[in-house]
Image: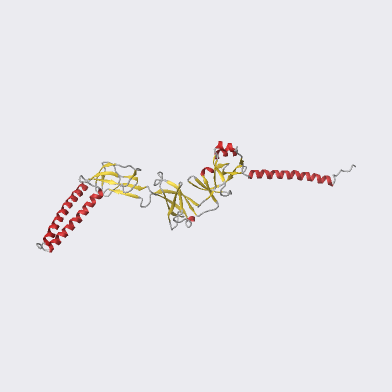
Amino acid sequence: MQARHRPSLAARTRALAGVGCVLGASLLAARAQAAALRSPPVIVLSASQERSLGVATAPLRSAATRPLASLPGTFAPPPNGRAAVAAPFAGTVVQVYAVEGQPVSRGQILASVFSRDALMASADAAQATATAQAAAQAQRRASLLVSEGIAAGARGEEADARLKSAQAMLAAKSLSVRAAGADRTGRYTLRAPFAGRIAQVGVKAGMGLEAMAPAFLVDRTDRIQVQADLPAAFAGRVKVGDRASVEGVTGRVVAVGSAIDPKTRSVPLLAEAPPRPDFIPGRLTRVELSDGPDGGVQTVSRAAVIRVNGRDVVFARQARGYAAIPVQVVAYDGDQVSLRTSLPGGTQVATRGVSQMKSLVEQ
């Protein structure tokens, strides 16, 4: 019977070493592949290619404030920013000079009204003027007679009293006529109380108007407020004076509620911002709240962030090209974006030519 051949110890050692080399090479290749997958893709561009693509860069900057919350809100006029223009006398609207949404200046005529009450008030004011003038003349004659000893002092006192009464009546009747802008024909005008925008028109030509009925609503346009509900979790962290950004316009928090609504679990918040033509009361918007600085947040132009393969990235300039670095967007503020990233402050990132770089990465 033939003896079975058994490999020597040296042969077995060489075989095991070969298998180990193969496994080691496979492991190294797998690690290299994983590292390649983890490392950000890099786009190498020459100077001429950058010019042709229109590439421009800007540095990442540390955010001056820390984004806190983004809340839905509604534009509203300030509490003292809306005024009703009321009719001082009952009458008939002759002509309307303003329409809803129209900007107006202080004192601008909004409508003219004919009123028999205004006509009577003008007549009463004219009569009061004549009465006051007659009382003044009588008072001067009485004072002269008293000074010459012809009349008793009581007569002069009576004349003084009648003059004061006539002057008081004249002031009262004239004030209402002047305030209404009424003339002797019985017409008066309704005017804008301040510069702003017509929020509502409640009259039209030929319409009867009752005394003290509101004919127009006028909103100020020098400021606007946003009403929002602040979640209870932020109630103690937001205070009056904190920064509030509304569609890229920087404002501030002017009021925060002190009690949590048990149904909504929120507190009312009021922010105020400079106006813009499209900031119209009643329109929905968003208010971005910020508080103190946060060293982990960077800001850059909004154009620098683009979505690549389902992730927000920026193209950071490096020695060997532009690397697509993932970022976490925190908040948008006009043409700026706040984001968290591993990149240090001052890193140059592409702000133009970003779409072309994206197409190169996704090829």
Going by the image, does 4 lie left or right of 71? Answer: right
Along the viewing direction, whichever of 204 and 168 lies nearer the viewer: 168
Percent x, y of residue 215: 30, 46
Q: Residue at x 13, y 61 (%)?
A: 156
Along the viewing direction, whichever of 152 and 96 lies nearer the viewer: 152
Along the viewing direction, whichever of 52 and 91 lies nearer the viewer: 52
Going by the image, does 4 lie left or right of 104? Answer: right
Which colour assignment does the render follow? secondary structure
Q: How many marks?
A: 0
Percent x, y of residue 194: 33, 48
Q: Residue at x 28, y 44 (%)?
A: 111
Please identify the residue farthest to the right as the structure is shown: 1
Snapshot quadrant of residue 307: top right
The answer to whether residue 269 of the structure is visible from this angle is: no
Q: Is residue 137 above or below residue 248?
A: below
Please identify the residue farthest to the left as the structure is shown: 150
Please identify the residue farthest to the front as the structure is shown: 148
Q: Residue at x 76, y 45 (%)?
A: 20
Percent x, y of residue 56: 54, 41
Say which quadrant the C terminus sits in.
Answer: top right
The answer to whether residue 337 of the structure is visible from this angle is: yes
Percent x, y of residue 219: 35, 48
Going by the image, does 60 lie left or right of 253? Answer: right
Say which quadrant the N terminus sits in.
Answer: top right
Snapshot quadrant of residue 105: top left
Along the viewing direction, whichever of 151 and 358 lies nearer the viewer: 151
